[in-house]
Amino acid sequence: MTDQTTQPSVTSPARASKGGMFGLSSKDTTLLLVVFAMVVLAPFILNPFPEGSGLAQFNAGYPDLMQRFVIFGIFAIGFNILFGLTGYLSFGHAAFLGVGSYAAMWSMKLFTLNVIPGILFAVIVAGLFAAAVGFISLRRSGIYFSILTLAFAQMSYALAYSVLTPLTGGETGLQIKNTDNPILSNIPEGEIGRANLFGAQMGNSYEMAVGNWLFTFNLGYYIAAAFMLVAFYLSIRIFRSPFGMMLRAVKSNQQRMNYTGLTPKTYTLYAFIISGMYAGLAGGLMVAMDTQVGPERMFWTASGEVVIMTILGGAGTLIGPVLGAGSIKYMENILSKINKDVLHQWFAFLPDGLEDAVVVFADIFVGKQWHFTLGIVFMLVVIFLPGGLVEGAQRITARFSRKKSSNNTPAE
C-alpha cells in the first residue's frame, strides 16, 4: 500500500491549508493533535500494568525512558527530512548529535545553566557543522555520499575521543564540575550546578498513585516533549511546502530538475543542514536532561541506529520515524532488563526440566541479546512491510474499513 504522506500534493499549499489550524490541512491537524495527546498522556499510556505485578516489567512510563522516546524521535524526524524526502542516506548523523551535545554542555559550563540557551546554541553549532560536512559530502551521491558522511562521523568521534580532549573530555567525557561557574548563574562555591529551566530542575517530578498504578509526571520529559511537538509541526510544514516538493523531485529525478533550471544539490544541502539542526536539537536536549556527554554519542552505531529507526517506522512518512524511535528505545530499555532470573519467575509453573529449556531458549531474545530480537523485527518489517510500521497500521485500518463497509452493504 502506498503511504499517502510520501506523495506530493497536487493542490497549492494555500489551498491545502484550508480546513485545519496552524496552517495545516484537516488531516495533518488531526495527526498533530494525536501526537500531542500521545506525548501528554504518555505517563498513563506507557504504564498499563499495576506496580508489583509480573507484567510491570513492560511498563515504560518512567522519566528517563520517556525522555529518550521524544529526544530520539526528534533525531529520527530530522533524519527523515533528508533520507525520506531526498533519498540521500547519511551514515554520519551521529556527528551532529554529538556536536550539539558538546555545544550545549559548553554553554552550560560557561554561560548559564538554563537549558534554553544551551539548546539553541546546540542547534546553531550543529547546523553550521552540517553545512560544512554537507558542502563536501554532497559532491557525491549514492553509496559514495553515505561513505563520506560515515567518514566524517568517525573522524569526529576520533577527534572527540583523543585529539580534542581539552574540549571534549576525551574518553571520560564532559560534565559539569564543582569548579564551573557560569557567568549568568549564581552557584555557591564548591557546589555542582544543575541544568534548569528558569530555576526549575529537570528532575522535578510529581507522582500520582491510582490504586496499584503509579504515574510519574516529569518536568524534563514535558520540556523535551514540547520541543518534539514543535519539531514535528515544522516537519509537517516542510513536507507540505513547495520546498518539500522540490526535495521529492530530487529523489524522483534529478536530471529533470536540471533540465528545468533548478539545482538539486542546493535543495539537498538545505535539507542536510535542517536535518543536522534537528540532530543538534536532540543532542542539546540529551545534555539538558543529563548533564554529561561522551564521544560514544558520535560512534557509527549511533548513526546506524537512526537509520533503522526511520526505516522501521516508515521512511518518508510523518509519524513513522517517531514510531520507529519509540519501538527501538522500548526494546533497548525493556527487553535488555529481562534476565534469566526474571525468565525463571515467569516460567516457574513448568516442570523443572522444561522450565530450564524454555528459559535457555527465551534468553536468546532478551537481556544482552536483545539486538537479536531487533534484527528479527527489522528483517520482517523490511520483507513484509517495506513502508514500515505506518504501512502495517494502514493495512490494518484498510482491512477493518473493508469489513465495516461490507457489513453495511444492504443485501440484494
Image (tube, rainbow, N blue to C red):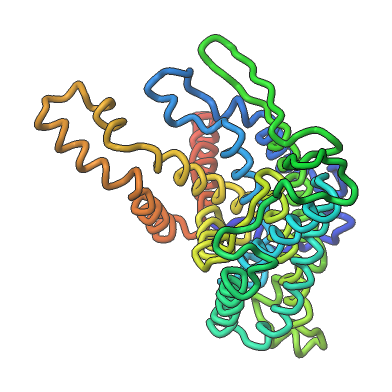
- Estimate the x, y position of residue 42 in percent, counting from the top left: 63, 31
Looking at the image, residue 79 lies above or below residue 262: above
- Residue found 61% across the figure and 49% down from its top: 322
Quarter occupied by residue 331 = top left
- Residue found 36% across the figure and 37% down from its top: 338
- Residue found 84% across the figure and 49% down from its top: 112
Quarter occupied by residue 339 = top left
Looking at the image, residue 174 lies above or below residue 150: above
In the image shown, does 76 or 177 lie closer to the viewer? 177
Residue at the top extreme of this rendering? 211
- Estimate the x, y position of residue 336 in percent, counting from the top left: 40, 43
Looking at the image, residue 408 lies above or below residue 21: above
| Residue 62 appears in the picture as rendered | yes
Residue at the left extreme of this rendering? 353
Quarter occupied by residue 94 = bottom right
- Residue found 74% across the figure and 66% down from its top: 126
| Residue 90 appears in the picture as rendered | no
- Estimate the x, y position of residue 64 in percent, counting from the top left: 59, 38
In the image shown, does 239 or 141 lie closer to the viewer? 141
